[in-house]
Amino acid sequence: MSLITNGSTGINLEKSLSERKAIIRENLAGYAFIAPWLIGFFAFSIIPILTSLYFSFTSYDILGTPVLNGVNNFKNMLQDKLFWKSLAVTFNYAFVSVPLRLLFAFFVALLFNRNIRGIRFYQMIYYIPSIVGGSIAVAVMWRRLFMADGAINSVLNLLGMDVHISWIGKPDTALWTLIILATWQFGSSMLIFLAGLKQIPQFYYEAADIDGANSFRKFISITLPHLSPVIFFNLIMQIIAGFTVFTQAFVVSGGSGDPLNSTLVYALYLYQRAFKYYEMGYSSAMAWILVLIVGLFTAIIFKSSSAWVFYESKEGE
């Protein structure tokens, strides 16, 4: 009897060790698969972020050794007129371009949600600007379009308007060319809106038809509430994109932010301080201010979402 018991215990122990080895092998395989991502995450995200935080408290010209200077970089921003100018330009750009882009995207998505013949072709056409819109080539094309001898003035002249101004050369209109460019790139937001519209159950609209609700009432009571999570997502993404705009402003203004710093967006000024004036410590401090600004707006949107974002899964709780 004792031999039988000892034999059974030995078999169980051997089985337990075998299972444990299998779990260890499985875990090691999992770690091996995610190792490239972890290495990339630490090498290209965590370490640069922490390094930037350290540089923000130093005086560093890239070629020399960083010298700790406390919070002087942040204090100097208070006296820097171009810092405040770039901040104002970025706020103007974000607060105008983000609503315009979302409205255009929403409007076009509503159109595409109807049964239109050749809808796939139109979706592709409207999405192309989002693919190529952030490229250098498009920014250069945009610069040519709005010059004094560009296509925009030619079209206006054909319509009988005697216009010969350089839209990108006037302080009053230069930023608007960037805003129009941003609005033109509404394709990605449009596709997300369209996917959200497709997910709204049709029986809500059928019930509203039975109750005699008109189109406006259905839009306010069904479409907007069910699409509010998508609006919330798009708003967050576009706010981040609006405050970090760089390429278009760099190319259209030739990297200067001219005329009269009217296109000197925050990221462009940060770039100038880092790679034109070699003030990496100051630019790192600017980067952290930008992180705080974007984080603040994101937090406000998240905080307010409980009042206007509707989740069907929470209905009735």
Image (spheres, rainbow, N blue to C red):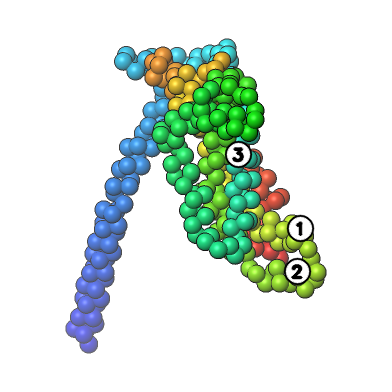
Element type at marker 1? helix
Closer to the chain start, of discs 1 and 2, is 2
Element type at marker 2? helix
Considering every residue shown, the one lying at the far right of the view is 212
Q: Which mark is residue 98?
A: 3
Closer to the chain start, of discs 3 and 1, is 3
Indicate the amino acid at tag 3: Val
Q: Quadrant of residue 301?
A: top right
Q: Are the residues flagged by discs 1 and 2 in contact, CB closer than 8 Å? A: no
State the image coordinates of residue 156 (x, y, percent, origin top left): 61, 31
Residue shown at the point (65%, 59%) measured from the top left: 226
The residue identified by callout 2 is 208
Residue shown at the point (34%, 39%) measured from the top left: 42
Q: Quadrant of the C terminus?
A: bottom right
State the image coordinates of residue 219 (x, y, percent, origin top left): 72, 58
Q: Are the residues flagged by discs 3 and 1 in contact, CB closer than 8 Å? A: no
The CA span between labels 3 and 2 is: 32 Å
